[in-house]
Image (cartoon, rainbow, N blue to C red):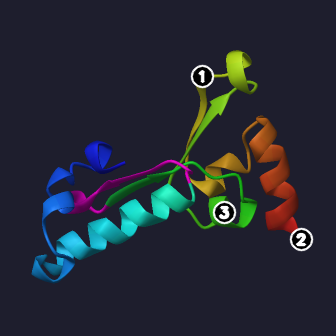
C-alpha cells in the first residue's frame, strides 16, 4: 500500500515530522488498507471518486457514473453519467433503485 500511494518515505521517517497534509494522506492510506473500497483523491482540484452502492450516498452525490449493464464480465461500459436528479429519469438498474429511495 505504501508504494501505491506514493508514500515510500513513510517507512524511514517519524510521524511527528510530517506536515498536516502528509498526516492526512497517511490517514487515508490507513483507511484504505482496513477497508479496501476504491477511493481516488485528487487533492489540488478537490476531486473524489468513490465506488459506492449505498443509495443514500448516491442520492447525495454531485455526479454519478454508472458502469454496466451487468456486473463482472457483463459490465465495464458507461451506461449513465449525470446528476442524481437526471438519473431519476434514466432506464438503468441503479436508477430503478434510486427512484425507490428518493420517492419515499
Q: Does residue 62 appear anywhere in the picture?
A: no
**Is 80 placed above or below 52 here?**
above
Q: Does residue 69 appear anywhere in the picture?
A: yes
Residues shaded magenta:
36-46
Tell me the element at label 3. helix
Q: Residue at x 24, y 61 (%)?
A: 43
Residue 27 image position (x, y, % from top left): 36, 71
Comes first in the chain, label 1 or label 2: 1
Comes first in the chain, label 3 or label 2: 3
Label 2 environment density (alpha carbons within 10 Å; few <14, some 14–19, many ≥20): few
Q: Quadrant of the C terminus?
A: bottom right
Q: Which mark is residue 76?
A: 1
**Is 86 placed above or below 67 here?**
below
Q: Is residue 16 left or right of residue 102?
A: left
Q: Residue at x 29, y 63 (%)?
A: 46
Is 40 magenta? The answer is yes
Rendering quarter of residue 102 = bottom right
Front residue of 1 and 89: 1
Label 3 environment density (alpha carbons within 10 Å; few <14, some 14–19, many ≥20): some
Q: Is residue 11 left or right of residue 46?
A: left
Q: CA distance from mark 3 to mark 1?
A: 22 Å
Please name which of the two marks, 3 or 1, marks the residue nearer to the observer. Answer: 1
Front residue of 11 and 19: 11
Which residue is labeled 2 in the image?
104
Is 88 magenta? The answer is no
Q: CA distance from mark 3 to mark 2?
A: 13 Å
Which residue is labeled 3 in the image?
59
Comes first in the chain, label 3 or label 1: 3
Residue 88 image position (x, y, % from top left): 73, 51
Q: Is residue 87 left or right of residue 39?
A: right
Tell me the element at label 2. loop
Residue 34 image position (x, y, % from top left): 54, 61
Amino acid at each position: 500500500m505504501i508504494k501505491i500511494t506514493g508514500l515510500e518515505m513513510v517507512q524511514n521517517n517519524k510521524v511527528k515530522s510530517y506536515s498536516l497534509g502528509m498526516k492526512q494522506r497517511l490517514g487515508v492510506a490507513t483507511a484504505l488498507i482496513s477497508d479496501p473500497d476504491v477511493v481516488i483523491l485528487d487533492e489540488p482540484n478537490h476531486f473524489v471518486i468513490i465506488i459506492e452502492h449505498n443509495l443514500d450516498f448516491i442520492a447525495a452525490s454531485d455526479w454519478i457514473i454508472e458502469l454496466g449493464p451487468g456486473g463482472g464480465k457483463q459490465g465495464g461500459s458507461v451506461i449513465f453519467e449525470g446528476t442524481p436528479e437526471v438519473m431519476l429519469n434514466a432506464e438503468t438498474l441503479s436508477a430503478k433503485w434510486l427512484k425507490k429511495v428518493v420517492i419515499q
